[in-house]
Amino acid sequence: MPGRTADEGASFIQAARRKQLVECAIEVIAEVGLARASTVRIARRAGVSRGVLTYHFRDRAELVEQVVQSVYDLGAEALALPMARAGDPRQALLAFIAGSIELYAAQPVAMAALTEIYADARAADGVSRARHRRHGREMSEMAAMLRAGQSQGLFRDFDVDVMCSTIRSALDGALAHILGGGRAEPYTTELQAIFDAATAAEVTR
């Protein structure tokens, strides 16, 4: 089996270094907030000079964006299998709720970093969740799932945008609870029950 070429080896090393720097940025932002997470502090956490960091990321804004992407990637990976196994939109909704809360419990540092970034959206390199494409994609996919459930007769007729916002707000509450040291239960069970009832097709008597 042929080994890596010099260029491939260099690319691999650079990718590994970028990943390390993003992970260190996540840790620092989660600990001290976005405003205090300077490139110097992040580089120090990674055990490198600030010049190494700025070699891989042109500025802090690019690094912050990579943090956001990395956390959403964790979410996509965590939810991929349970969502794929869901047999219909109703099961997909329950899997989305459970999988999201399990992610929060499994990745509290990453979720805390994302929360800090979104909380400081007005900073020069802050990020607005409402305008970020990954958040928009998540909401669009949730809306498509709910509309599919309505078209299949599994969900009642409700305003999809309102329901999406309500589910997102409830999950935000679960995240705040977990980041505050709370347990995932009873949030998973209760939110599944609440939204299963809230979306259920009306039964004619």
Image (cartoon, helix red, strand yellow):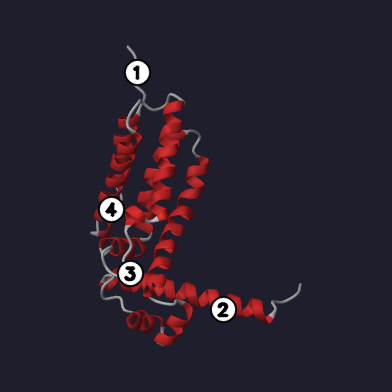
**Would you call the spot at circle 4 few (<14 residues within 10 Å), some (14-19), or many (20 or more)?**
some
Q: State the image coordinates of residue 176 (x, y, percent, origin top left).
A: 25, 55
C-alpha gap between disc 4 and disc 2: 38 Å
Residue type, label 4: Arg
Residue type, label 2: Ile
C-alpha gap between disc 1 and disc 2: 59 Å
Q: Are marks 1 and 4 in contact (CB under 8 Å)?
A: no
Q: Which mark is residue 125?
A: 3
Of residues 26 and 157, the one nearer the viewer is: 157
Q: Name the residue located 43 percent from the left edge and 87 percent from the top edge.
A: 51
Q: Is residue 205 visible?
A: yes
In this rendering, the label closer to the viewer, 3 or 2: 3
Mark 4 lies on residue: 183
Q: State the image coordinates of residue 100 (x, y, percent, origin top left).
A: 38, 49
Mark 1 lies on residue: 203
Q: Which mark is residue 13?
A: 2
Q: Are marks 1 and 2 in contact (CB under 8 Å)?
A: no
In this rendering, the label closer to the viewer, 3 or 1: 3
Q: Is residue 164 above or below residue 70?
A: above
C-alpha gap between disc 1 and disc 4: 34 Å
Most extreme residue toward the right, as rendered?
1
Q: Name the residue located 54 percent from the left edge and 74 percent from the top edge.
A: 15
Residue type, label 3: Asp
Q: Is residue 68 above or below residue 16?
A: above
Residue type, label 1: Val
Mark with earlier residue (3, 2): 2
